[in-house]
Image (cartoon, helix red, strand yellow):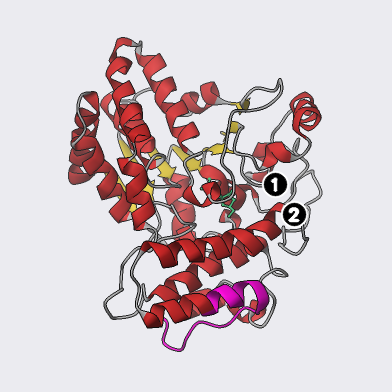
Amino acid sequence: MPDTPVPPVILGDEPGSFPYGVLAERHPAIIRQVRDALPYGPDERRALDALLKNCTEGVIEPLPDGAHDRDRWRTWGLDTYTGRSWFEVPWLWSESYFYRQLLEATGYFAAGPWQGIDPFRPSKLAELAAPETDAELAALDGLAELAADEQAEALLHGSLWGNRADLGFRLSDPGGPAAGTTPALVADAGAALWSLLPPDGTGTLCLVADNAGRELVPDLLLVARLLEEGRVERAVLHIKPYPYYVSDATTADVLDAVRRLTEAPGAAAGYGRRVRDALTDGRIRLRAHPFACAPLGYAEMPAELYREFGAADLTVFKGDLNYRRLVGDRRWPPTTPFAEVTAYFPGPVAALRTLKSDVVTGLDAATRDALDADEGQRWRTSGRHAMIQVKG
Ligand SMILES: O=P(O)(O)OC[C@@]1(O)O[C@H](CO)[C@@H](O)[C@@H]1O
């Protein structure tokens, strides 16, 4: 049992709060963006308009009869929440169901012309093509001059800060450097993370990926490097079975990222080829379990995932949403030990995350006080701070 009393799950019902803003403003903005991005026909447009009205003024509606995942959503709480306001049910549930309903509106799941078309792909591709991505890939050319440990460290930090590249987040926050005197990295268990990998290099790393594009590219670079250096023998990359939270990575996004690497000049192409080879020979395995898009925390993961994570030497959770699901979507006192809230997890686990929601654990009191003094509560959601946390 945790020593800290468990706070209630976060709801989106408090006007002015961050979760309320996501439901009331970010979700409508996402629908408008999707409407503009692709030439959907009148039926899809009507359905998107209906969702726009429903998600702000209406109540949660069931999935249509015959939806392939209706039973799954019922086990995930759909019957309990049907008929309730989007703002009054757990925020994580509300957000997840919003993305499910958005895909319903665009015809993503139905047999027809829009089946399997990712509504977010135009923005994901634009990000991959951006000059900032060129600059990040060009920086790889200088990496080989560093010592092995420094290279691994640089790639770990690249993967961590890649989490700022979250297209949904950018709809409501233009970003900027950390303010005040507190460091950007507010918890750094980087050294402990490396120590969890078996020294003989036989380990399995699970990486629970977050965003495509400029987050997935550095994730792949990190995995490629660890394989090449013999720090791990194999890696399992957990991605999403369908588009989610705007920029979350799917199989198609992995393929786009690998192509972006192999077609780049310089050292990047070599990394791309190594990722491609590792996918081909099974040293990197893709896993797209339905639970990756569940509106629930990982404490409720199904038995097969529990076994898989339990068998890995280290599981790395990337990003803010995965963090919320790992520790529980609750307003924990920020000094709640990370090891306490992840005690249920079946093996060694690490979180690499920039702070983009109210959920935080594992800060020391001095850091929390400095952040509060410098920024009020803004540090929790601005994406300007990051953390590396581990439970061995
Ligand atoms: O998981 P990610 O990409 O790091 O962040 C997801 C996010 O942008 O979406 C949620 C709000 O919709 C927040 O948890 C977080 O800010």
Name the kind of residue labelled 1 in the image: Asp
Label 2 beta carbon within 8 A of ligand 1: no
299 to the left or right of 307? right
Name the kind of residue labelled 2 in the image: Ser
Q: Residue at x 43, y 52 (%)?
A: 247
Label for residue 358? Answer: 1
Q: Position of residue 16 (x, y in %)?
A: 76, 55
Vertical side of 29 occupied by 342: above or below: above
First in sequence, mark 1 or 2: give its number.
2
| Towards the viewer: 133 or 159 | 133
Q: Which residue is mark 2?
A: 17
**Label 2 near label 1: C-beta < 8 Å?**
yes
Q: Is residue 67 magenta?
A: yes
In this orientation, does residue 361 appear? Answer: no
Q: Residue at x 43, y 46 (%)?
A: 209
Q: Position of residue 170 (x, y in %)?
A: 53, 46
Q: Residue at x 67, y 45 (%)?
A: 341
Q: Position of residue 318 (x, y in %)?
A: 49, 42
Q: Which residues are magenta?
A: 50-68
377 to the left or right of 352? right
Q: Is residue 387 magenta?
A: no
Q: Position of residue 354 (x, y in %)?
A: 57, 37
Label for residue 82? Answer: none
334 to the left or right of 385? right
72 to the left or right of 86? left
Vertical side of 382 occupied by 194: above or below: above
Would you call the spot at circle 2 few (<14 residues within 10 Å), some (14-19), or many (20 or more)? few
In what element is the residue under mark 2?
loop
Q: Residue furthest bottom?
A: 65
Q: Residue at x 49, y 46 (%)?
A: 166
In what element is the residue under mark 1?
loop
The quarter of the picture where residue 219 lies is top left
